[in-house]
Amino acid sequence: MRVSANRDAGNNSARAERLFAASLFVLLTVVMSYPYSVHPASGVLTIGTDTDYCIWALGWDVHAFLHQPFSIFDANIFFPFKHTLAWSENLVGSAILAAPIIWITNNPMLALNLLALASIPLSAYGAYFLARRLGLSQTAAILCGLIFGFSPPRFLRLDQFHLTTIQWVPYALAYLHGYFHTGAKRELRLAVAFFSLQALTSGHGGAMLLLGVLLVVGERLVRGEPIALARRARDLGVIGALMLVPPVLIYLPYRAARVEVGLTRVLDDWSVSTSSFFSSGSHFQTWLMSRLPEWPWLKHEPDALLFPGILPIALAAAAFLVRSRPPSGTRSADYRWLYLAVVLLTLWFAIAPPYGVWRWVYWLPGLNFVRVPSRFMLLGVLGLGVLAGLGFDRLMAARSTVVKTRAAIVIGLLMLGEFAVLPLDVQPYRVDPPSVDTWLATQPKPFAVVEVPLPDSYSVITQERRNTLYMLYSLGHYQPIVQGFSGIQPPRYMDLHWKLVKFPDEVSLRALLDLGVKYAVEHIDLIPPTERDEVAARYEKFKDWLTLEHVDGQGRVYLLHYPRQ
């Protein structure tokens, strides 16, 4: 009876610790991301093509869940091409969570913001959970969570939705460690489940997790763990194998896109400036940088914000410099070299040529999904968090629980002060498809649409911003549109773009009709005022090719057809 009571008390204590950690990370998310955290329906952190794409992708995915679940990758952009959702991040895993929000509010921007915010405490708690699984103390694990959740290299990716949603990585690694430590089948299956969830949520996160898994498995093999493929397969079982089906199914359209339109990753200019490794964007770091000498390599504009903070690095160094051991019965010291390898390898990926390794490995399966290798530094931040927790436990090994707790509070507050970037700059933004686009939803389907006008500009940014705007407009009807924005452009897409700049004329009309486009939606408010008379004259000239179907405010819908004899 006494043993049972002690076990219950231990379980209650563990639950209380987990609840405290989770509540702390949620509270800190609200504070550290203010005012973004309290106004998620009012705007976005960055107005641009990536934000538009992610809002559109969530909206499309949720629509496809109900209307075409088995052809979800045949998204409604770049008509008439297929598998267009596979030309970039598909966000299907996030869309599963976004679906109730979108169904209730019809606001994919709100869903995007809420899921981005949720990624912070989920990431922080995941790092905490991983640290506890590795044997770190409660206080050290919380510090680990603070680093992975709020360190600027990860925290300031909030406006890059496919990069902030890497929250399932530490859970998968934690269960993989648990499997190797206990041999429990449940641990392996949970690791696979979180791997699948991460692969569905973010391809970048899936690539990072794959790298982490390879390092964990490699470390076990070096330490003498048998490969034992037959036993691993039995431990995985039918249930575990079924959990691998979703990422396999996701892979198939990407493979098809590779064949159809040459979706391949080439070795672009992937290097980042040296100053990027010393820049974080936090208030403290900005102040500190202003006090340093005018070294050219340090004052160069950073390409990314990759500096994780002075305190995390100092604590991580303590894991190797402090000789005292963690309390007996823990196994945390076994993992110092593994997570040092995680940090160093991801850093090596990011280093510019000729010293960087990326040019030799970018083509490998999984890694070739990532265009900018410095993004692997997000996995490095997780590794640094684990090392920092290990360092804290070594520093506090001979201290009482009270002293350790007080030290963790002080270090945690200093760390959050070093990380702070608040208040975040929220840009007012709305996603409201015009009424002419929602009117199209009432027409017999399917049909293809072209949205006009297109900007007569050689600026790629100008072109892409107009294309993503029309992608958001297409959420009013979800029918295929000619325009699009993604990781690649289909063959001859820019040829069509320049034809459509002068729409309507015979060249553009024939090109659209040959493609099978049925409707043209004219947004008069997007035509420069000085050009409206000229455009109106073209519509009058080619009225035999166009039948006005609907007018609503500044929008008009035309039916396209060859001149009637």
Image (cartoon, rainbow, N blue to C red):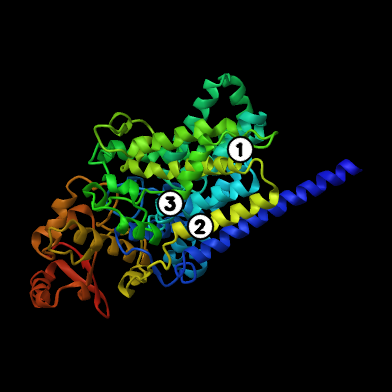
Q: Nearer the viewer, residue 40 or 541?
A: 40
Tell whether 160 sits left or right of 546: right
Tell whether 40 sits left or right of 135: left
Residue at image coords 39%, 56%: 57
Q: Nearer the viewer, residue 185 or 16?
A: 16
Q: Position of residue 225 (x, y in %)?
A: 58, 21
Q: Which residue is mark 3?
A: 154
Residue at image coords 39%, 43%: 377
Q: Which residue is mark 2?
A: 414
Task: Pick whichever of labels 3 and 1 is earlier in the sequence.
Answer: 1
Q: CA distance from mark 1 to mark 2?
A: 25 Å
Q: Position of residue 271 (x, y in %)?
A: 26, 41
Helix, strand or loop at label 1? It is loop
Helix, strand or loop at label 2? It is helix
**Tag 2: amino acid:** Leu
Task: Pick whichever of labels 2 and 3 is earlier in the sequence.
Answer: 3
Within-10-Å neighbours for mark 3: few <14, some 14–19, many 20+ = many
User: Residue 205, can we see it?
Assistant: yes
**Tag 3: amino acid:** Arg
Task: Pick whichever of labels 1 and 2 is earlier in the sequence.
Answer: 1
Q: CA distance from mark 2 to mark 3?
A: 18 Å
User: Residue 368, can we see it?
Assistant: no
77 versus 433 height, above or below: above
Helix, strand or loop at label 3? It is helix
Q: Nearer the viewer, residue 353 or 469?
A: 353
Q: Which residue is mark 1?
A: 134
270 versus 437 height, above or below: above
Residue at image coords 64%, 33%: 331
Q: Position of residue 452 (x, y in %)?
A: 20, 66
Tell whether 322 sits left or right of 549: right
Q: Position of residue 74 (x, y in %)?
A: 36, 49
The residue positioned farthest toward the bottom in the image shown: 553
